[in-house]
Amino acid sequence: MNSHFLSLCKRFLLFCFSCQLFVSTVNAQAVADSVAKAKRDRENAEKAKPTEIYSPVPPIVTPGKTDAEPPSDAIVLFDGRNLDLWRAEGPDSNRAAGWKVHDRIMTVDKKAKGIMTRQRFSDYQLHLEFRIPENITGSGQARGNSGVFLACISDSGSDVGYELQILDNYNNTTYVNGQVGSIYKQAIPLVNPSRKPGEWQVYEVVWTAPRFKADGSLDTPGRVTAFLNGVLVENDFIVKGITQYIGKPYYKNHGAAPIKLQAHGDPSEPISFRNIWLRPLAAAHPCCDW
Ligand code: MG
């Protein structure tokens, strides 16, 4: 071996040694970083504990097979079989709901007036499907007019309450605070996601009933969030009072109340409903005092 070759070998060995030293140093730093990070994570986990709450545990609810089907804790108000959970509006609370049930849907009978739930509700989530008939006629407010009275506060069942409007506005104009998706004459819907007559449409509603003080004056107003065909039309709207056709809305003391479906007096062809269910809502769980 000549001296040049020996020199090359020495340089190569020195290079290998340097590389090993570098790798070891990097590894040692990585381990040190990892240990420091684990320590920081443990310390942060301890600091986070005071704001982590484990009760009350939200109850388990089994959802429907589709979002349209009632979840396990729903009250099914109409499943296509009968109107046992409804009554006709009017002073006689024993009078059966007069609308026709056929083909697992119900169709408004305008002569039989509106129908009200026998049960009373406060706050709830409501699912409801309706269909304007394909052969609908009329215009403005006289074209498939109905409505959901989120709370019907007159036992006689007249239109005293808070109306979420139902109307055919697929290709029909009217005053915008009276079109489908409006809180009648109080809130213009954010958008108009109407489907055409003949197609089923879906309301998903969250209703927070107003509360009243012992002296009957308003404590907190009602609030409504509503989706029409999956599209938000009312976003936590603060209701101004009971629906008025003439004049301005105002509040009137009431407790839990039925829901009413309107049989509007316009001469257009009657609309139909199906698949109506509701989940009464408990008070929210304000878990935290921060
Ligand atoms: Mg109406």
Image (tube, helix red, strand yellow):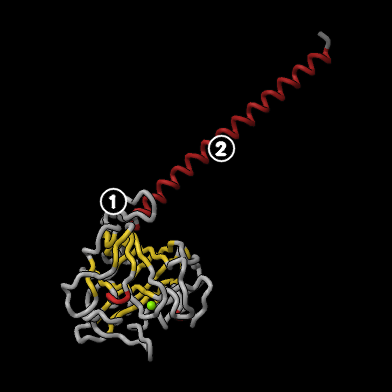
Q: Position of residue 281 (x, y in %)?
A: 28, 64
Which residue is nearer to you in this view: 281 or 24?
281
Quarter of the displayed picture in which ligand 1 can be seen: bottom left
Instruction: State the residue lying farthest toward the top.
Output: 1
Residue appearing at x 44%, y 80% in the figure: 141
The answer to whether any part of residue 55 appears in the image is no
Confirm or deny contact between disc 2 and disc 1 (CB under 8 A): no
Residue type indicated by callout 1: Ile
* Residue at point 35%, 83% (across, down): 243
Vertical order, 249 against 42 (above or below): below
Ligand 1 neighbours mark 1 (CB distance < 8 Å):
no
Which residue lies most toward the bottom here? Answer: 247
Q: Nearer the viewer, mark 2 or mark 1?
A: 1
Up-down: is 65 above or below 224? above
Q: Is residue 14 visible?
A: yes
Amino acid, disc 2:
Gln
Quickly name the residue at label 2. 29
The quarter of the rendered structure image containing the C terminus is: bottom left
Q: Which residue is mark 1?
A: 60
Q: Residues within 10 Å of mark 1 (few under 14, many from 20)?
A: few
Q: Secondary structure at mark 1?
A: loop
Q: Secondary structure at mark 2?
A: helix
Residue positioned 31% across, 72% down in the render: 109
